[in-house]
Image (cartoon, grey):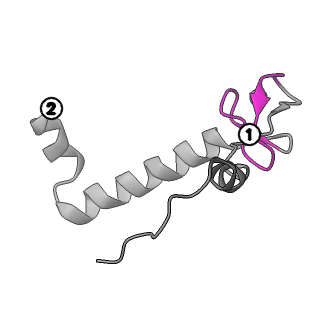
């Protein structure tokens, strides 16, 4: 296995690590609730983006999908679910 001939100087290691610093994520205040949020992302606090509510719409879509799945799986549908619960 190849081995290094000489150890690197402290300066050489420090120069390499000069690019390793992490930057803070750029947070801006949400225009609707004022909580800090990431740019180009939905607000995680109030669920709005560009003045529109995003989270509520997603929930409605999920519910529609779930309803479709249950009807596909069993022909009995809701009655069978009621028996399970
Ligand atoms: Zn918000």
Q: State the separation of the CA atoms marked 2 and 1.
A: 45 Å
Q: Nearer the viewer, residue 21 or 43?
A: 21
Q: Main secondary structure of the magenta part?
A: loop
Q: How many marks?
A: 2
Task: Measuring from the top left, give residue 38's x and y in whole percent.
Answer: 75, 40
Q: Residue beneath label 1, please?
A: 25
Dot 1 beta carbon under 8 Å from ligand 1: no
Q: Is residue 26 magenta?
A: no
Q: Is residue 53 above or below residue 36?
A: below
Q: Is residue 55 above or below residue 34?
A: below
- Whichever of callouts 2 and 1 sits on the residue coming sooner in the sequence is 1
Q: Residue at x 73, y 49 (%)?
A: 18
Q: Which mark is residue 85?
A: 2
- Report crowding for label 2: few under 14, some 14 to 19, many 20 or more residues within 10 A (C-alpha): few
Q: Which residues are magenta?
A: 33-49
Q: Residue furthest top?
A: 34
Indicate the quadrant where residue 36 lies.
top right
Q: Nearer the viewer, residue 64 or 49?
A: 49
In this rendering, position of residue 26 left or right of residue 19: right
């Amino acid at each position: 296995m190849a081995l290094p001939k000489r150890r690197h100087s402290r300066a050489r290691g420090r120069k390499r690590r000069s690019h390793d610093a992490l930057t803070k994520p750029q947070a801006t205040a949400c225009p609707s609730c004022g909580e800090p949020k990431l740019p180009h992302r939905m607000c995680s606090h109030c669920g709005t983006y560009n003045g529109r509510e995003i989270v509520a719409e997603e929930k409605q879509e999920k519910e529609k999908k779930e309803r479709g799945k249950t009807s596909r799986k069993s022909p009995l549908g809701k009655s069978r679910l009621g028996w399970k619960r």
